Amino acid sequence: MSHPGRLEGKVAIVTGGGAGFGVGIVEKFVFEGAKVVVLDINEEDAKKVSSAQPPNLSVGLKGDVSCEADWKAALDAAVETFGRLDIVVNNAGVVYKACPSIETSEEDYDRVMRVNLKSIYWSSKVIIPYFLAQNVGGLFINISSMASPRPRPSLVWYGASKGGVTNATKGLAIEWAKHNIRFNVIHPVAGETNMVPLFLGGPDSPEARIGMMSTIPLGRFALPADIGNAAAFLASDEASMITGAALDVDGGRGI
Ligand code: ADP
């Protein structure tokens, strides 16, 4: 007997879907039956990831998540290509090279706030009215970081942006629950992604990576599939009673 995927019939926008954790989210969502708009500032990566999926299940789109017009274009793309939108995964994010808080440049500060936090603002402002008009609920999954519940001394402003993501997600969850729009946040530990060299601060070496992994009780970085699995659960009907939750996908780092 064939078993339908947990996201059969759903349409999602996955931001930052062109690299890192985003790829794991796109792959898992498609595997579970969703159709996906892969939104990334890197158009080539967005299109590469979407064309690696089975035909007609995904589309790659260039967009900046801190920009209102690009959110409107992503919503239009979902509705025009797949007929609807059910799920937004705010995964796109940036970090700067780890350094003491008073040495972080204003440019880096502004960039982490603009990409990591303003993206939550614009996605909410653009997509919530669409969900309300459809009157069938909706779902947001925001990818924060373990730097939110456990701030790191060398990434203070990054942690502040991710703390904002966690707090905004909880506030939004309370605000929109009566319309069955659910908001949940995932706190990944550092992943095997482009970000590792930046988190390390110092030179990237096998020893430095092993040192960082040793702070994670399960002894490894998060894989894109780990985040994809957590996001697919939160996006599924199995999580229909869960809103405002923060799920640590951290190998025990936060204990
Ligand atoms: P992570 O560990 O979060 O997966 P990566 O750097 O590997 O980190 O992936 C982050 C993704 O987010 C990249 O594909 C990147 O191009 C994308 N991204 C970064 N900034 C923006 C932005 N402003 N708008 C859309 N996508 C972005």
Image: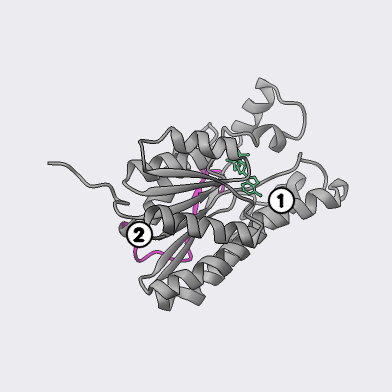
Q: Kindly identify which residue carries mark 1.
A: 158
Confirm whether the magenta stretch covers residue 249: yes
Give, as a three-letter code, the residue at label 2: Ala
Badge 2 density bin: few <14, some 14–19, many ≥20, Cα 10 Å = few
Element type at mark 1: helix
- Near-viewer residue (107 or 210): 107
Q: Is residue 174 visible?
A: yes
Ligand 1 placement by image quarter: top right
Which secondary structure is most common in the magenta stretch? loop
Q: Kindly identify which residue carries mark 2.
A: 239
Give, as a three-letter code, the residue at label 1: Tyr
In which quadrant is the N terminus drawn? top left
Element type at mark 2: helix
Where is residue 227? Give x, y as percent.
47, 43
Where is residue 226? Give x, y as percent.
45, 40
As drawn, the residue found furthest toward the front would be: 80
